[in-house]
Image (tube, grey):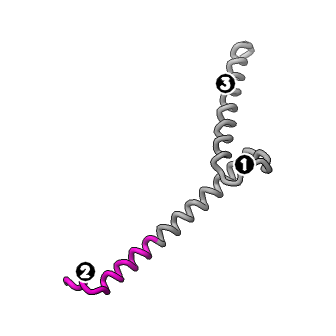
Amino acid sequence: MNDPSVRMTINFRERCRMHDLNEALDDLRQSIPYAHGTSVRKLSKIATLLLARNHIVMQANAIEELRQTVKELKEKIQSLEAEKPGGPSATA
């Protein structure tokens, strides 16, 4: 492994890998609310990942709350339709 061309190839691949990783992290930073702006410093890699994780968890919780709300509203609609004259229960 003393061949300089092998070492240069390895170094080149590593630089490309790190460049790709840094680009992906920059893209992730752009998609996280409050992670960019004129008064915000560039987040570290770990801070970017932690903030992204927290954002995903918050979004998942919001989705679950919305699903529960939709379920409750559907139940309320069914209840109201069953109570009104000419509703589904009137034909039964």
The answer to which of 81 and 54 lies nearer the viewer is: 81
The residue indicated by pointer 1 is 36
Q: Which residue type does callout 3 highlight? A: Arg
Residue 41 point in image, percent of width and height = 79, 47
The answer to which of 65 and 50 lies nearer the viewer is: 65
Q: Which residue type does callout 1 highlight? A: His
The answer to which of 39 and 61 lies nearer the viewer is: 39
Q: Who comes first in sequence, dot 3 or dot 2? A: 3
| Residue depicted at x 50% and y 67% | 66
Q: Who comes first in sequence, dot 1 or dot 2? A: 1
Residue 85 point in image, percent of width and height = 26, 86
Check the image and report above or below for 77 versus 34.
below
Segment tinted magenta in the rendering: 70-91
Q: In the structure shown, which secondary structural element does the residue marked by tag 3 occupy?
A: helix
**Crowdedness of circle 2 by 10 Å Cα count: few (<14), some, many (20+)?**
few
- Point out the frontmost of discs 3 and 1: 1
Q: Quadrant of residue 44?
A: top right
Q: Are marks 1 and 2 in contact (CB under 8 Å)?
A: no
| Residue depicted at x 58% and y 60% | 59
Residue 81 point in image, percent of width and height = 32, 81
Q: CA distance from mark 3 to mark 1?
A: 30 Å
Q: Who comes first in sequence, dot 3 or dot 1? A: 3
Labelled disc at residue 88? 2
The residue indicated by pointer 3 is 13
**Residue 74 part of the magenta segment:** yes
Q: CA distance from mark 3 to mark 2?
A: 68 Å
- Point out the frontmost of discs 3 and 2: 2
**Crowdedness of circle 3 by 10 Å Cα count: few (<14), some, many (20+)?**
few
Q: In the structure shown, which secondary structural element does the residue marked by tag 2 occupy?
A: helix
